[in-house]
Image (cartoon, rainbow, N blue to C red):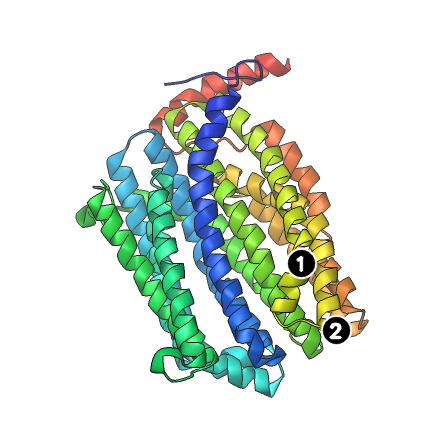
Amino acid sequence: MYKKEDDQTFLWGPFLKKLAVIAIPVAVQNLLTTTASMVDTMMVAPMGEMAVGALGLCAQFSSLMFSGYWGFFGGGMLFISQYWGSRDDEGIQRSYGMTWVCMMTVALLFGSLAIFAPGLVMRIYTDKPLLQEIGASYLHIVGFAYFLQVFSMAMSCLLRSTERVWVPMAASVASVAVNLFLNWVLIYGNLGAPAMGIRGAALATTCAAAVNVLVIYLLAWRSGHPYLFRLRGHFRWDRVHLKEFFLKCFPILCNEILVGIGNMAINVTFGRQPESVIAAIAVFRTLEGLIIGFFAGFSNAASVLVGKCVGAGELDTAYERAKRLVYLCSAVIFGANLILFAMHRPILTRMSLSGASYEAGVRMLLIYGVVSVIRMGNWIQNDTYRAAGDAVYGTVLEIVFLYVMVLPCVLLSGFVFRLPYWMVFLCCYIDEPIRYVLMQIHLYSAKWVKPVTENGKAALPRFWEARRKKTG
């Protein structure tokens, strides 16, 4: 049913309540996961900057895997949230099945590389032999966690899209608790266990990932989730639905893979910097994860709130929600940055940064504190467009600017002109203001409203007729 809602009738109270119900549990879940990574770094920190740097390089490989499966995660949320809005049970189950298979294929690739060729992976990221050796010992074990982590993310995609966000949040609480305890036991050999060092951190991560999957299954089963356990419905595909799924996922997948490759080239550039800068980058990436993890809760909420309205045919409401979400989320990130920077001194020193590495970490946080507000504005707009059915516009912009502007500037400044590390770092974000302007133009054009459900498609002509009358 088509529902019209404009600037005069928009109800902020119910909107903020719905946003909080979805965003806060997801943000808490992501923060717990990132906090566990930060604690990993802190607990490894007494082993020295080389151990911290190696752990950071391994995290960059994990981020590349994230880029590989996130395209399918985004595509899954697009379909599941819209089918959830139109109450299409078969569409939800079918979309989850396709999402799960695609994501697990990515996990198989990266898990196999980590387990069977960890030395090769580390040689790509750095030319420092000691970093390669330490990182390879970590990857060889943590590769087993990749399968479990991606499995839990696929289930989280379904649960978040159907507004059962508390289940993955509770699982994250259990997982983080197990990870922290096993870190304490295995890294330094407490309670009679052998002192495994960085390999102990990898084993703790793997065990925690297994707990995460188990708790999600148990809680979803006890709450009677209507879609997670209907296995036959997950694999009732046909050519028409597969084609539609991959047509929508393909731009998102290309975006994430090409961005991941671009970021890998950037990380390779920083992997050739002095050891102090490599350690500072490792710590910065962990702290950046806190901001992104917190923000991702609001981004996922935006995807569900907008996608659900588009799927139900409430297109005006989806449009009005999208406009407000962009500015609201940017304001939240600005506040989070202020809190992080106010606490930066004890955090950086606790993570073994001192002298040159501490100075590098502070400069990176200062630069990021400014550019991340614009960057997250671009992110929330792109996620909103994807949830509404437009997976192309933001993808094309991000890829074009990354390969035409960002990568050449980073590579030239790092390898050719040998500029200071902070200038190389700044080059990573030079495209964000330009893209923000272009994304804003697209936002107000409403051309990103592209339903995949019958209810949404039926409401589209009236939506455009109302906009033509409004704009004259």
Q: Tell me which corner region of the image, top left, top right, bottom left or bottom right, holds residue 173.
A: bottom left
Q: Are marks 2 and 1 in contact (CB under 8 Å)?
A: no
Tag 2: Cα neighbours inside 10 Å, few (<14), some, or many (≥20)? few
Assign a secondary structure to mark 1.
Answer: helix
For the point 31% across and 62% down, the residue is: 211
Tag 1: Cα neighbours inside 10 Å, few (<14), some, or many (≥20)? some
Eyeballing the image, is 78 above or below 401? above
Q: Position of residue 146 (x, y in %)?
A: 39, 66
For badge 1, the amino acid type reads His
Mark before the other along the chain sequence, 2 or 1: 1
Nearer to the camera, 454 or 22? 22
For the point 39% across and 34% down, the residue is: 452
Can residue 342 be seen by looking at this rendering?
yes
Q: CA distance from mark 2 to mark 1?
A: 15 Å
For the point 25% across and 36% down, the residue is: 89
Horizontal relation, residue 272 to residue 304: left or right: right
For the point 49% across and 36% down, the residue is: 302
Eyeballing the image, is 85 above or below 425? above
Eyeballing the image, is 360 above or below 384? below
Assign a secondary structure to mark 2.
Answer: loop
Provide the residue designation for mark 1. 344
In the rendered image, which quarter contains the C terminus? top right
Q: Position of residue 1 (x, y in %)?
A: 36, 18
Q: Tell me which corner region of the image, top left, top right, bottom left or bottom right, holds residue 309.
A: top left
For badge 2, the amino acid type reads Gly
Can residue 408 be seen by looking at this rendering?
no
Q: Tell me which corner region of the image, top left, top right, bottom left or bottom right, holds residue 51.
A: bottom right
Provide the residue designation for mark 2. 355
Q: Position of residue 304 (x, y in %)?
A: 43, 36
